[in-house]
Image: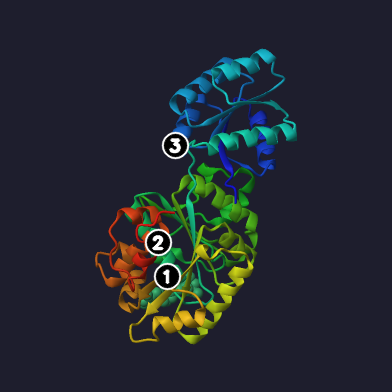
Amino acid sequence: MLVPMSVIVVGKDAGLRTETRTHLAATGRVHVIAESADYQRAIELIGQLQPHGAVIIVNGEEEAALGLVRQIGHAYPHTAIICTGKHCASETIVRAYRAGAHEFLMQPPNPQELREVLERLEALLGEGRVSRTGRVIAVYSSRGGSGTTTVAVNVAAALAQRTRQETVLVDLNLQYGCLQVFFGVEPTYSLTDVAHNESRLDVQLLRSFLTRVTDGLSYLAAPLKPEEADDIFPAHLEMVLGLLRTQFAQIVLDTPHVLDPNTIMALDQADLILLVTLGDLASLYTTKRVLETFRRMGYEAEKVRLLLNRHKNKEVPLEKIEEVLGQKITFTLTEDARAALEAINMGKPVVLSEAKSLLVRQFIELTKLVAPVEAASTSPGESGRGLFSALFGGKKR
Ligand SMILES: Nc1ncnc2c1ncn2[C@@H]1O[C@H](COP(=O)(O)OP(=O)(O)OP(=O)(O)O)[C@@H](O)[C@H]1O
Ligand SMILES: [Mg+2]
């Protein structure tokens, strides 16, 4: 799926800013991630949010607006600049281009012209301009209690720690999400606030709804009351994930077991699905059906990785499990009831604990699967069964 272009809108006139946002949003190809009436603040926002583009309204203070165009071109040459305005003289348009604007859009824009402008900008961005598009990793299991949340929490924490890039975990267990128990930090805001503010949601507001765990790790809580789950629709999740992709290197999703429209939206959006299963017959039976369903949904084999959790060496041989499922197990996590229990009691993911158990090492190894570029530059450590290095060692994607 094409990632929407992230832009900030700058202009003195609040009415024109709103009109501009509405026209851009109607295209479905642009996310307005912030807006400002202040030119200095606009420069700060570009530095902070690294949007693909800046839409600058020239009405009102033309000189200052064109000064901003020059400043952005100088300080952030990889940011696309779109000037716009109402009743502008042709002289203003020429001056905007001379100042460094890539495009000029007359207000109200004609839909065809707007489409063409966006196409040209997308081509420009595709030619190597900076774009921040985080990777979405969904953790899913067909059965309750398989360890979905345990895996999601630890993968997110290990990714933040190892890659030193900002990582966010989204709790999609809309009725009874419980990430606060795993992280030991109570949320103030949740996905409900996202839904209730959908018309004015931008990255600044979205960031204010996150719960901070460590410097590089935060989470977006599920609704705080079960009945609020009804307020969340797939369009909200699409918007949230689009905005988070512009801000975070890794976005991990803890998904519920039911394949409802919200979960399907989350899985569709994911670049990678970690499908967690246990080794018992009932789990294998439902996991096999999930794999078939994913195939029918058109997911490519590369997108789905099987993760066998709570594996005990003396259990059914892996080859037998793979035979039943008709698919290779990509990764195995060992049974470690003590570590798992302690983690919940302490409100701290196992990978953030002091003890470096086999399970912790496996979670760290697992991050190489979801951050494959990094895997190429680090020596392979101990994995559940050494399959990881055979499958992914040194392979860049
Ligand atoms: N590798 C493991 N070793 C031992 N215990 C584990 C392991 N992984 C998970 N557990 C334990 O299994 C239980 C279920 O885990 P978790 O809550 O992560 O599963 P879930 O699939 O998210 O469940 P739910 O259906 O409630 O969302 C927890 O008590 C957890 O501590
Ligand atoms: Mg769970």
Q: Which residue is mark 3?
A: 48
At 56% from the left edge and 15% from the top edge, which residue is drawn? 63
Q: Residue at x 38, y 49 (%)?
A: 165
Label 3 vs label 1, nearer the camera: 1
Mark 1: amino acid: Thr
Disc nearer the start of the sequence (3/1): 3
Question: Which sits in the foreground, 263 or 219?
Answer: 263
Relative side of 113 to 336, left or right: right
**Quarter occupied by residue 157:** bottom left
Question: Residue shown at 69%/15% (left/top)?
Answer: 90
Measure the alpha-carbon separation of dots 1 and 2: 9 Å
Point out the tag, 2 or 3, that comes first from the N-terminus.
3
Decide: is 14 above or below 254: above
Q: For mark 2, does the 10 Å Cα neighbourhood hold few (<14), some (14 to 19), or many (20 or more) residues?
A: many
Q: Residues within 10 Å of mark 1 (few under 14, many from 20)?
A: many
Q: Which residue is mark 2?
A: 369
Q: Are marks 1 and 2 in contact (CB under 8 Å)?
A: yes
Question: Residue 174 falls in which quadrant of the image?
Answer: bottom right
Q: Amino acid at mark 2?
A: Leu
x and y percent of residue 260 in the render?
A: 63, 68
Q: Can the viewer see residue 27 in this picture?
A: yes
